[in-house]
């Protein structure tokens, strides 16, 4: 199984380059460059966006000095981080200490490969994309656990254990909600999940299944916020209690990698929410012919980017408006509320399918 | 998978070498957590071998269950029992000897059994669709002659019972505080 790139560019290179292996290598390099561009580009934009959203929620202005309204602030911050000296604390396990940031970056990049940004704009179209995304999410937990342990710091270890327990718990809800969508659309491939929502805005899975689609979307928001380790569920960092949690001892490039993973995860989770509930790259047709034809002219990846940024904005508003629960309240929410409701939701979904109550 | 078998062979030997190397490191490294990390790399190597045989689903399950599930719980356990991760452990000579005898015996039996099989050839990738998610699902949920719907449902009920039981065990009793 060579992950073929279903893009006209990939076909062009396959037809021009005489050896299939060489064409595959060139295509792979192009895909890697594309994924890296999306990842690093979005991380820089998102850090700026986060600071601005946070500032405006708190009635401040945020970064204003560097460039127009502080646009170059994140570039300066990134440069500062990259030029810092990287060192491990004394007594730390150096091998695991430097391995942890690399492990934590694997899962967001793998997820990014499977996201269909447009009909032709996807690195790997896999028939088992959703189970694969659930599977590689485990590496994020592993990176946090190893990083927290290798720092040789009690705060880091506590943060890592709390974060690990939280992510393992919420992964169940996260996976079950994705499987709810798999059950509804009848396919685990993200391209086919998108295709199953073709039509107008009421055909998106959030509206297509009456009531429980919206319920599933809200639960997805909660469980993915916890899965992302973002406030209000940032138990792993909790800077007021744990001075920064699992990445207390990290600095320079290694810290930048943790930070980068957090923001790419934000992009991939928002993209998953968009693909599963909000119609992916399909335009939001509302049934009025004039507006619909104008909307259909806009390329799919622009719609996709707009929806993703809307979702990211929602996550940011959640982050800056809610307060953090205690760790036991967090666990209660998952095990005593979200999980039973999730099981009921899946049963209700089966009832809806068999009775044909889907719009 | 490649048009030229040379590349397939090259990939196989690279992956197999990586699996062997990391598997040896798992047992020789002094730190339990480092062993766990090498174990994950070894499992992912196995998943790549499955991918080379077009068994996409098995590869995905390998990553999900072993690399993503089992090893993470192992790491979690090591971290919770704090002293295991912090001090390097040593294995005494008699235990080393017993382990050596067992592994040589296992290797010998396996090679003997493999060589007994006539017409042993290299593994051939299966046809594209036989191991896809759809065909496995059709087989598992089939109520016909070749279906496995009853075992599948029993296993899923077992998993549900496990989930409910674990919540019940973890729950605080009314009087307890």
Image (tube, coloured by chain):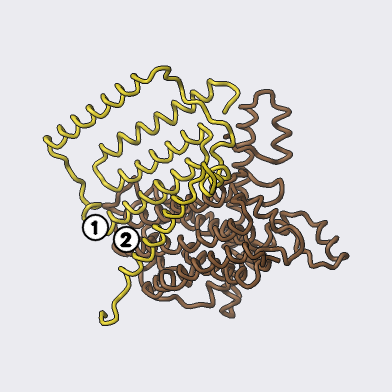
Alpha-carbon neighbours of circle 1 within 10 Å: few (<14), some, or many (≥20)?
A: few
Residue A212 in the image: state x and y as whole percent. Answer: 60, 70
Chain identity of mark 1 = B
> Residue at coordinates 50% horizontally, 61% vertically from top-left?
A174
Q: Are marks 1 and 2 in contact (CB under 8 Å)?
A: yes
Residue, disc 2: A157
Numbered disc 2: secondary structure: helix
The residue that disc 1 covers is B82
Res. A72 visible in picture: no
Q: Say whether residue A17 is left or right of residue A156.
A: right
Quote the CA–CA distance across marks 1 and 2. Answer: 10 Å
**Viewer-proximal residue among A336 and A149:** A336
Image colour for chain B is: yellow
- Say if A291 sits above or below B61 in the image: below
Q: Write the residue at 70% across / 56% down.
A: A281
Query: Which quadrant holds residue A62?
Result: bottom right
Front residue of this view, candidates A18 and A254? A18
x and y percentages locating residue B41 in the rendered image: 39, 40
């Amino acid at each position: 199984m060579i992950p073929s790139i279903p893009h006209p560019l990939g076909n062009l290179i396959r037809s021009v380059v005489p050896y299939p292996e060489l064409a595959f290598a060139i295509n792979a390099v192009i895909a890697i460059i594309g994924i890296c561009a999306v990842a690093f580009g979005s991380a820089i934009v998102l850090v700026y966006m986060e600071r601005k959203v946070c500032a405006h929620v708190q009635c401040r202005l945020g970064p204003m000095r560097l460039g127009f309204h502080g646009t170059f602030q994140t570039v300066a911050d990134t440069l500062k981080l990259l030029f810092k000296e990287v060192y491990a604390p004394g007594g730390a396990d150096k091998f695991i200490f430097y391995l942890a940031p690399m492990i934590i970056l694997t899962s967001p990049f793998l997820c990014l490969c499977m996201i269909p940004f447009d009909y032709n704009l996807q690195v790997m179209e896999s028939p088992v994309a959703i189970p694969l995304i659930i599977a590689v999410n485990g590496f994020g937990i592993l990176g946090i656990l190893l990083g927290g342990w290798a720092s040789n710091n009690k705060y880091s270890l506590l943060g890592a254990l709390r974060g690990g327990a939280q992510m393992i718990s919420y992964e169940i809800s996260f996976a079950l909600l994705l499987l709810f969508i798999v059950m509804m659309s009848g396919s685990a491939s993200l391209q086919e999940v998108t295709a199953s929502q073709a039509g107008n805005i009421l055909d998106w899975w959030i509206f297509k299944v009456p009531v429980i689609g919206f319920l599933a979307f809200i639960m997805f928001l909660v469980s993915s916020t916890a899965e992302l380790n973002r406030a209000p569920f940032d138990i792993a960092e909790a800077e007021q209690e744990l001075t920064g949690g699992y990445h207390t001892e990290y600095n320079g490039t290694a810290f930048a990698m943790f930070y980068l993973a957090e923001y790419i995860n934000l992009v991939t989770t928002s993209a998953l929410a968009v693909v599963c509930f909000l119609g992916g790259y399909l335009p939001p047709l509302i049934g009025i012919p004039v507006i619909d034809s104008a909307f259909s002219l806009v390329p799919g990846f622009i719609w996709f980017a707009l929806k993703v940024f809307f979702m990211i904005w929602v996550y940011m508003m959640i982050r800056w408006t809610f307060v953090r629960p205690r760790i036991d309240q967090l666990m209660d929410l998952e095990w005593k509320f979200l999980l039973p409701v999730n099981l009921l939701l899946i049963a209700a979904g089966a009832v809806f399918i068999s009775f044909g109550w889907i719009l | 998978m490649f048009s030229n078998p040379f590349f397939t062979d090259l990939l196989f030997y690279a992956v197999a070498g990586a699996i062997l190397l990391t598997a040896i490191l798992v047992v020789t490294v002094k730190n339990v957590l480092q062993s766990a990390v090498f174990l994950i790399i070894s499992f992912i190597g196995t998943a790549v071998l499955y991918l080379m045989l077009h068994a996409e689903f098995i590869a995905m399950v390998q990553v999900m269950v072993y690399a993503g599930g089992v090893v993470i719980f192992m790491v979690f356990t090591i971290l919770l029992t704090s002293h295991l991760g912090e001090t390097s452990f040593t294995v005494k000579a008699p235990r080393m000897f017993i382990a050596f005898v067992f592994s040589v015996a296992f290797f010998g039996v396996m090679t003997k059994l493999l060589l007994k099989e006539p017409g042993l050839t290299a593994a051939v990738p299966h046809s594209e669709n036989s191991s896809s998610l759809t065909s496995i699902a059709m087989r598992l949920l089939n109520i016909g002659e070749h279906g496995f719907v009853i075992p599948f449902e029993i296993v899923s009920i077992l998993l549900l019972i496990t989930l409910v039981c674990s919540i019940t065990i973890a729950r605080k009793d009314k009087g307890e505080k």
